[in-house]
Image (cartoon, rainbow, N blue to C red):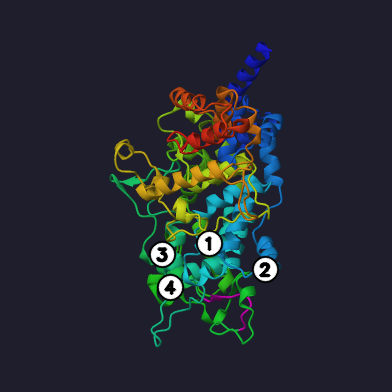
Amino acid sequence: MAAYRVLLRLRRILALALFGLAMALPAQAQRIFASGFEPYAPETDAEAARFLTQASFGPTVADIARLRQIGYQAWLDEQFSRTPSLQVPYLDFVAGIPEPLYQNARMEAWFGNAITAPDQLRQRVAYALSQILVVSDANGPLEIEPRAVSVYCDLLSAGAFGNYRTLLGHITRSPAMGSYLSMRGNRRPDVALNIRPDENFAREILQLFTIGLVQLNADGSPALVSGQPVPSYNQRNIKTFAHVFTGWNFGNCNSFDFCSPGWPEAVGWTLPMQPFASFHHTEPDADPDNNEFLSGVLRPAGGTPNSNLDAALDNIFNHPNVGPFLARRLIQQLVTSNPSPAYIGRMTAVFNNNGQGVRGDLQALIGAILMDPEARTGHLTQPTRFGKVREPILRQTQLWRAFGARAQNNRYADWNPESHFNQAPNRSPSVFNFYLPDYQRPGELASLGMYSPELQIVNEVFVTRTANWLYNQAERHYLGSQFNPNPDARTVMMEFNNLWSLANSPAALIDHLNVLLMGGQMSAHMRGVVLAYIEGIPYTAFNDPGGRQRSWEAVHLIVTSPEYQVQK
């Protein structure tokens, strides 16, 4: 058995070495590696839990066993092939009860998919994309249109493993995005009426969705000229794209300015926007300030709203910045806030060419991000720089998934998570999301040149609120809690009974939770502190039947600890 474990360890080291070598080779060699080398499996439950923390909304005991049984690549293939779990069917269910549709129903749909959907990787990537391609219900029209936001979220879920160019086309034609960034109803210039095309979407698709503010090298570093960064676009480019992004409105209107009486507005929010050619700008040569795409490409005259939109998106998508820009943001969302330039460079190469000559393949990119040696071993090779702060809402999803949380009515009624987490899905205060990818927390992290995006939403108020919320979850929101013996049908309750059998051995209890909640990353110091505290709770005490107090106290101490808040 010992020899077999040594063999597995050597196989794992060889796999990592070959993978790193393959990523540095041309596309042909990458294809040979991908088709001819059998992927490895996690050697321990802790390794499996670490991977699942990056690739899902939190590991479960069953998922850890499944991953160890079939291995990384088989698990990825399984996830890539799963049918998308969508939000709109849940809204249809709520409407059919019948209940009025508010954003509450959308939030229930999001939590339901995050906690129970079998396509965990797709849901996790869609959530990451929702923080890059931002649409928020903290917006006048969208605040009262939960179906519009859910349709948009479903676009991200459906496109999470497709091509980024295709996804850009879908989100650009989305009425939710059109409303959020004021492209819907944007019309060609009219000097007599003093109308000029709105530049909002044109600006944000460049700055926030694709290329960023400055020219990038393939490894994500700024490309310098005479020691200075070079802007990736200018106001002339913005004006050109703004003129192209004209002539679009709801998909079921018979007029650009007016939808006839009886128009079903709810349907309009669910359809792609449609073009109205008479409101679309087609004469770029009339104004030299709006005839230039990126990279000096001149916008041709004529065309249709669709052909010109596609030409604009093609020009943006093929800019060399898109690969490193998107790769870094997805790495930050899933794996680590401070990826090495080499890691970003390897992912840029995959984005630029998936091994079959295809640019923008998100499935290839996600698989490469998760299987890169830095993702799998960065906590060992660069322990002081690797990892990311857990978003508060992901602390809740991990807790709920780990312990099979559900309500009697099978709904997840956390309607306003921003009140205790300072964030909620698709509810950011602006198109810049809740936090910036380049945020540096003043103090030690900033002095080390390290980014800590999620710390931008951490302050004294929400440190307390989040800790109190998680304490309440651990103490009162499990079946059998003496503090909440008769929960109502809407209360989401966890199952700790699998912990009770471990509670007579505090060391075994803590080791189990270390794997399940922390991917085995608990320090010896933290383990000693938690163990001493749990051992101090008498197992036979009146208020600890079956080890309940030891169990919930151990969960509470871990999920509110500083170490847990850093995903390694």
Q: Which mark is residue 198?
A: 4
Magenta stretch holds residue 298: no
Q: Tell me which numbered mark, 1 or 4, is placed earlier along the sequence.
A: 4
| Secondary structure found at label 1 | helix
* Residue 337 appearing in the image: yes
Total numbered labels: 4
Q: Which residues are magenta?
A: 247-254
Circle 4 packing at 10 Å, graded few (<14), some (14-19), many (20+), is many
Q: Tell me which numbered mark, 4 or 3, is placed earlier along the sequence.
A: 4
Q: Which mark is residue 313?
A: 1
Tell me the distance, in whole angstroms, between the alpha carbons under discs 2 and 3.
44 Å
Type of amino acid at the residue the image marks with label 2: Ala
**Residue on which the image places disc 3:** 237
Q: Which is more toward the observer, 159 or 58?
A: 58
Residue 560, compared with residue 430, is above or below; it is above
Q: From the image, which quarter does the N terminus lie in?
A: top right
Type of amino acid at the residue the image marks with label 3: Asn
The percent coordinates of residue 539 (x first, y second) are 57, 26
Main secondary structure found in the magenta portion: loop
Tell me the distance, in whole angstroms, between the alpha carbons under discs 2 and 1.
36 Å
Q: In the rendered structure, are the residues bearing label 2 and label 1 in contact, judged by CB atoms less than 8 Å apart?
A: no
Q: Which mark is residue 394?
A: none
Residue 424, compared with residue 528, is above or below; it is below
Residue 176, compared with residue 361, is above or below; it is below
**Residue on which the image places disc 2:** 95
The percent coordinates of residue 409 (x first, y second) are 68, 55
